[in-house]
Amino acid sequence: MEGSVARVLITGASRGLGRALAQELMKAGHQVVASARNLDDLGDLKVTSSCALDVTNERSIVEAARRIGDIDILINNAAYSISGPLEAIPAEELTRLIDVNLIGPHRLVRAFLPAMRKRGSGLIVNISSASARGAPPLQGAYAVSKTALTFYSQTLRQEVMPFGIQVLNLEPPGMNTKLVETQQGFSHTGYENYQTLGAELNRRRPEVDVGEVAKRIVNEMDQQPRMAISKTHWLP
């Protein structure tokens, strides 16, 4: 990507890391298509173009892909988190979490990979999490979804390498975003000690500036040589 202008689609660009990535990529001179479920949330974001896109809705993705056209880079960033003892998390909530954090990126890959394969180039960036390397109590559900995305990326990378397509899986640490404070929490009798500990750890956990993480990610993307297989990266 270094030295050339790329057309980049970012999911979940309304806030947090997605918004920071959109801003950094624009600074670097790239064409950025920012997407979010609610188009109004992107109104103040200065990007090349914006579009409404729900990663859980096949029709929404197909329509967005039709409007957007070809892209050079797909950044699967949209995600959310829930917390609580695994016993307390309803199956339908875990299903929804995995639908957003894993199946959502898969839907986007299916929508945009064919054109990349036909063209013989492209970069897919999946935003996993440091949680994929290990999770404390109460964060297991989120960690499961991100671990699955990391393994998905590893397999996808091997499959698309012959077509000149790169896959970059990134596992950033906890950042100063609203991901944790807005997550839905589930409780269950008998886990009170863990929940007290979890609240204290969240209060004291070190946070990396999301803008700095975005800069690191854009730098990682710039360093990917054409036709090379990129590895899973731990950030920062």
Image: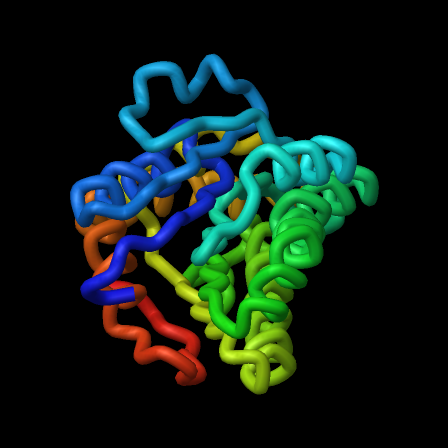
Camera-side residue of 2 and 90: 2
Camera-side residue of 197 and 89: 89
**Where the C terminus falls, by quadrant?**
bottom left
Indicate the quadrant where residue 2 lies.
Answer: bottom left
Is residue 13 visible to us here? yes
Camera-side residue of 119 and 171: 119
**Residue at the right extreme?**
91
What coloring was used for the rendering?
rainbow
x, y percent for residue 18 = 38, 40
Compared with 115, 71 (above or below) is above
x, y percent for residue 231 = 41, 80
Camera-side residue of 139 and 133: 133
Left or right? Give the position of 58 relative to 163. Answer: right
Count of numbered circles on the image: 0
Compared with 43, 103 (above or below) is below
Is residue 206 visible to us here? no
Q: Residue at x 61, y 49 (%)?
A: 101
Left or right? Give the position of 42 relative to 83. Answer: left
Indicate the quadrant where residue 89 lies.
Answer: top right
Indicate the quadrant where residue 112 lies.
Answer: bottom right
Q: Residue at x 44, y 18 (%)?
A: 41
Q: Residue at x 67, y 62 (%)?
A: 114
Left or right? Give the position of 149 relative to 58. Answer: left
x, y percent for residue 230 = 41, 79
Q: Residue at x 38, y 15 (%)?
A: 43
x, y percent for residue 135 = 50, 62
**Where the N terminus falls, by quadrant?**
bottom left
